[in-house]
Image (cartoon, helix red, strand yellow):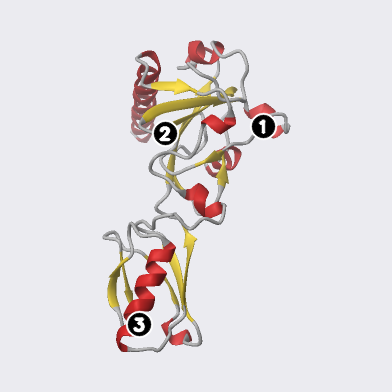
Amino acid sequence: MKSISHRILLALMCLGLVACASDNMRDVREGRARMVTTMEDLPPPDSSSLEGVYQGVPDYRVGPSDVLDIAVYQLPELSRTMRVNTRGYVSLPLVGPMLVGGKTVQEIETELTAKLAEDFLQDPQVTVFVSEYASQRITIEGAVKSPGILSLSNKTTLLQAIVMAGGVSETANPRGIIIFRTIKGERMAAVFDLREIRGGNAPDPQVYGDDLIVVDESGSKSAYRTFIQSIPVLGFFRPF
């Protein structure tokens, strides 16, 4: 009975992956997704501003489940690390519940400074740091050992994301690693050769929240064979 249940579960998982592959291939065939020609043509997706954070530009907007390190100069009792709740709030001493979801670090610092200065402190000095970007998630599916949804806690590359998913399985096609991403309202995709990335011969691109990574299977199980074979050079973004 246990063996039968296990086979049924595997069958359902396979059907789910096939359905996802069919949806993605439909995007390709119907022009809702396209390849781009260079690394520069694949910027962060519409819903992510992680690139600004990593380049020192504080334009990232805090989301639910992110972890904030809040420090008030010379007042350690007001400094703490806290996780943003599902409604986008944190609860702070003296201030109480405060909406931080959807705001930048600078906006949070400015608002918190004003609240503390209004009734409690003279010239408070507040710093806010996002220590965990838990609201940024990617989906990885196909021929990896642990497919699913992964949280990005730092700057993450494609190779690192595959490692986070347990690595590729024995049935993986290392020449068929596909990233799907929405940029400026347009569905886009890129194909990479994992062997070239590992060998340092191709770029290891950064991945962002809301990216979908598909590791294609080799041989007759491939759902993207025609699509991948139509691209003469792998490891670079190319147009459909």
Amino acid type at circle 1 is Ile
Residue 149 appearing in the image: no
Say which label, 1 or 2, has the lower sequence index.
Answer: 2
- Structural distance between the alpha carbons of marks 1 and 3: 50 Å
Say above or below: 178 vs 103.
Answer: above
Q: Rate crowding at label 3 as few (under 14), some (14 to 19) or many (20 or more) other CA atoms within 10 Å.
A: some
Residue at horizontal 38 percent and vertical 88 percent from the top: 121
Which label sits in the foreground, 1 or 3?
Answer: 3
- Structural distance between the alpha carbons of marks 1 and 2: 23 Å
The residue where tag 1 is placed is 197
* Helix, strand or loop under label 2: strand
Amino acid type at circle 2 is Ile
Residue at horizontal 51 percent and vertical 28 percent from the top: 143
- Of residues 14 and 18, the one nearer the viewer is 18
Residue at horizontal 56 percent and vertical 25 percent from the top: 237
How far across and how far down the image is residue 10, in percent? 39, 29
The residue where tag 3 is placed is 116
Which label sits in the foreground, 1 or 2?
Answer: 2
* Helix, strand or loop under label 3: helix
